[in-house]
Image (tube, rainbow, N blue to C red):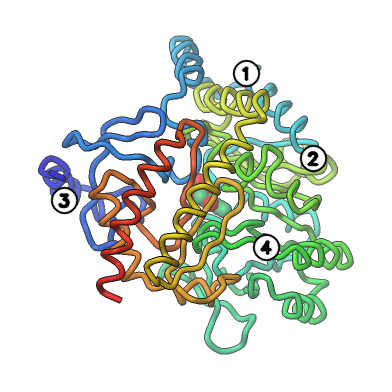
Amino acid sequence: MNYTKSKELFEKAKGLIPGGVNSPVRAFSSVKMDPPFIKKGEGAYIYDEDGNKYIDFVGSWGPLILGHCHPEVVKALKEVVEMGTSFGAPTEIETKMAELMVEAIPSLEMVRMVNSGTEATMTALRLARGYTGRSKIVKFNGNYHGHSDSLLIKAGSGLLTHGVPNSPGVPEDVVKNTIIARFNDIEEIEEIFKAQGRDIAAVIVEPVAGNMGVVPMDGEFAHRLREITEEHGSLLVMDEVMTGFRVAFEGAQKLYDITPDLTCYSKIIGGGLPVGAFGGKKEIMEKMSPIGPVYQAGTLSGNPLAMTAGYTTLKILRDNPDIYTELSKKAEMLEDGLKQQVQELGIQASFNRVSSMLCMFFTDQEVVDFETATTADTEKYAIFFREMLSRGIYLAPSQFEATFINAAMTEEDIKATLEASYEALKAVKQVQ
Ligand SMILES: *Cc1c(COP(=O)(O)O)cnc(C)c1O
């Protein structure tokens, strides 16, 4: 494929934007190549500035479950844009959006709209702290909740529960109230609560972790997490930024049959525009400003464009439950095909999939947490990725991201993807 124009654009961008990108993973560094610049999307496909066409398995990192430019979403956006893009005043669409979400998700009685997933988790935790009057939070290693200071923390090498900042600029003081725990480890979370339970405001968890590949919570672990937080008067905050309206219309909490105290959303609920939200029990949510003491605000929060894209997307999903069956079917077809190919070629790979979120890890281990996820061979992934891209298949440019199926994809698209993957895996095999 020819990338002349993309290369030029990237060179220019690098002089003006750090790394040439507005979010790090877009720079393609972990797959060791320069990124194509995308010009447009249409259904299951995206096109770059050099005219190359790809089947898109990224979907803007999750939001585009309906594919690009769904006609109803585009039509609705065109209508509202002519009436003004933001007022900083209440609009009806915000209530309609809240109503749709509250009716869809049993654990939600009230929601507040923000502008990103980062804002949603950051504020939900502030609310949890304000509500409980406690300061500590528990986060799982390898779970990602956006880039707010107190959540940019990873496991330290010494004491298991003592985390260290994940980035310069995050003071030790800020993360000292964040306890880091091992995902899917019941014993460890029990120990943490035994020792510090009365200080823990909340546990935040990605029910299906989607930022270390795809790693679902173990069912028993999930239920114990709910019990233990309840026993200690701590809140369970589910970060459904990626899984909400993705793994099922009602999200991962439906699949696990768990009622969290607070849930965070973003991605799909914005229909491709910047939106975030958090919600839960009325009693907790009413602690939010202006009726409660916990402060939060946003100039563009709930703006008509974002609300319209999100509302239209959610309405389509609600009214067409078959979409989820179809998504799962296509994802399964892809997973089965890949499994067959790696087996035939003798390549070590392990798979995790929940509905339309899939990950093939280049490892012989079953992936259940951060430690096992990071056994994956990122060199092999880089080769696989580049071979796929050169055949018109756009995967996430990192081993530790999800592959998303969208509703615009056809079985033919999956077949074409499997034809490409067979060749790509042969290339991986050559370096094994
Ligand atoms: C994407 C993501 C976030 C962060 O959302 P942004 O909109 O990028 O700030 C938080 N949590 C999870 C689970 C995510 O996948």
Q: Which residue is mark 4?
A: 217
- Front residue of 327/136: it is 327
Q: Which mark is residue 15?
A: 3
Give the side of residue 363 with respect to residue 277, left or right.
left
Q: Which residue is mark 1?
A: 91
Which mark is first along the chain, 2 or 3?
3
Please tell me whether mark 1 sits on a helix, a strand or a loop: loop
Instruction: Identify which amino acid the numbered label 4 is placed on.
Output: Met
Query: Which of label 4 and label 1 is nearer to you?
Result: 4
Please tell me whether mark 2 sits on a helix, a strand or a loop: loop
- How far across and how far down the image is residue 201, in percent? 76, 63
Which mark is first along the chain, 4 or 3?
3
Q: Quadrant of residue 167?
A: bottom left
Instruction: Identify which amino acid the numbered label 3 is placed on.
Output: Gly
- How far across and how far down the image is residue 398, in percent? 38, 60
Instruction: Identify which amino acid the numbered label 1 is placed on.
Output: Thr
Q: Name the residue at 62% across, 84% down.
A: 160
Alpha-carbon span between mark 1 and mark 2:
20 Å
Q: Name the residue at 67% across, 23% down.
A: 319
Which mark is first along the chain, 1 or 3?
3
Q: Which residue is mark 2?
A: 286
Query: Which of label 3 and label 2 is nearer to you?
Result: 3
Alpha-carbon span between mark 4 and mark 2:
30 Å
- How far across and how far down the image is residue 418, in percent? 38, 49
Which mark is first along the chain, 1 or 4?
1
Alpha-carbon span between mark 4 and mark 1:
38 Å
Alpha-carbon span between mark 3 and mark 4:
42 Å
